[in-house]
Image: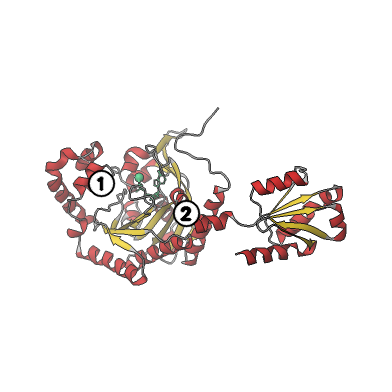
Amino acid sequence: MIQRPRGTRDLLPPETRLWQAVERVAQDVFGAFGGDEIRTPIFESTELFVRSVGESTDIVHKEMYTFPDRKGRSLTLRPEGTAGVARAWIENSLNDRSHPLRLYYIGPMFRYERMQAGRYRQFAQIGLEILGANGPLADAELLVTLDEFFRRLGFDDLEFHINNLGDPEDRPHYQALLKQRLGLRRGELCRDCQRRFDENPLRILDCKVPACREVAKDLPAVDEVASEASRGHVRAVEAQLARLGVRFVRNPRLVRGLDYYLRTVFEVVSPQLGTNTVLCGGGRYDRLIADLGGPAMPGVGFAVGEDRIVQVLPASFRDAVLALPRLYLVPLGERARDEALGLAAGWVRAGVRLELEVAGRSVKAALKRADREAFSFVAILGDDELAAGVIAIRDLARSVEESVALSELPAWITRQTASSS
Ligand code: ATP
Ligand code: MG
């Protein structure tokens, strides 16, 4: 038997309904704040990620799915979404449109990760970027959009962790300070962090190995050496959040796993998952587009991990999505079977969600199936009923049965659903 590759999943019904519903909420909320969807390729030139995400990051260093195509060009399955959006922005001259642009994406990402709970090699992200605004109000709007997205999904216990990464000019100073402080304790770090010490000591703050976390606890925060401009920027973002009642904490260890961030960085943490598997990460990346050869164009964005959202989706949202009422239409007799599809199509047009019994089950078998499949209503259509223009319909939750005029069925279902919620 051929099996799916390690780290991939088959998403099956009814769980796929949850995925669709989460994506609809993202489309609604991001759209309501002026966003539009962008769809970029799932694979890009390897160089794009090396130059944007950064050579010394875990993603580029050990997590990319990179392969030569038939002409020997090096391609990579996208490990994240921002680099592709930035490339598309340059390549399609989106600079010519009025700013800022709010662009969101939804789709699969690929990282060759060690297998553990909540970590897949193909996973999905929902991301939003605001391009062309450099003030703190754009960061705040982005976070408020994110907060609204989580609210509509029914979350009420999430925490925003925020930090100031400083400006790129502050970086060498901070890296030197880290090296100086870490010098004596270098031996306590994990193998990866020994390498990071030389390549990019900032990454040590992001390490999840407990020993490294212990060492990182005592390190100075970037904010302490950051430019006054960047400190003011992040404080202004926080002031907006406080004003709007968005729950956040300043987390001075937060650095994020990508090199292009500066100033504001953030994560969204669920108490159910903890800080090792965060729901969302993001930040500001004012130099990325210029670094990729475009004009100077500031940006700020986030990416939500859709797999993790679905995993911890509040019961209120889950139940509402999975319990959408469905009708099971069972025709009995020759005439009823001839007419049933036409009736079903008409009711669907009127907004009913239904399934037609097309496998020829008996009433008894059909009722058993209705129970097992959690239908809300079963309608039995016999030749006699058809002749009289009515149908016998049973509300399974309430165990009531009624005879309803065929033309009245959509209205009847709407009434039942409204009175039960
Ligand atoms: P982590 O610290 O958990 O490795 P990350 O910093 O690598 O996350 P980002 O690159 O910021 O993650 O991606 C944004 C979001 O995408 C994460 O917060 C997470 O929800 C999700 N995500 C990242 N990697 C995976 C994965 N391998 N499987 C499932 N979801 C993932
Ligand atoms: Mg990671």
Residue 68: tell me if it is visible: yes
Secondary structure beneath disc 1?
helix
Residue farthest along the top direction in this orientation: 1
Q: Which mark is residue 313?
A: 2
In screen coordinates, is 324 left or right of 95?
right
Residue 393 x/y as whole percent: 75, 57
| Residue at figure coordinates x 46%, y 57% from the top left | 104
Please report contact status of discs 1 and 2: CB closer than 8 Å, yes or no: no
Residue 143 x/y as whole percent: 38, 63
Q: Nearer the viewer, residue 274 or 256?
A: 274
In screen coordinates, is 379 left or right of 75?
right
User: In the rendered view of the protein, which quadrant contains the C terminus?
Assistant: bottom right
In screen coordinates, is 58 left or right of 400?
left
Q: Quadrant of residue 183?
A: top left
Crowd band around label 1 with a 10 angstrom C-alpha radius: few (<14), some (14–19), many (20+): many
Circle 1: residue type:
Arg
Residue farthest along the front direction in this orientation: 399
Crowd band around label 2 with a 10 angstrom C-alpha radius: few (<14), some (14–19), many (20+): some
Residue 264: tell me if it is visible: no
Q: Nearer the viewer, residue 112 or 260?
A: 112
Residue 110 x/y as whole percent: 43, 42
- As displayed, is residue 357 above or below residue 190? below
Residue 25 x/y as whole percent: 51, 60
Q: Quadrant of residue 79?
A: top left
What residue does disc 1 label? 203
| Residue at figure coordinates x 56%, y 51% from the top left | 17
In screen coordinates, is 356 left or right of 251?
right
Q: Nearer the viewer, residue 245 or 403?
A: 403
Circle 2: residue type:
Leu
Q: Quadrant of residue 50?
A: top left
Secondary structure beneath disc 2?
loop
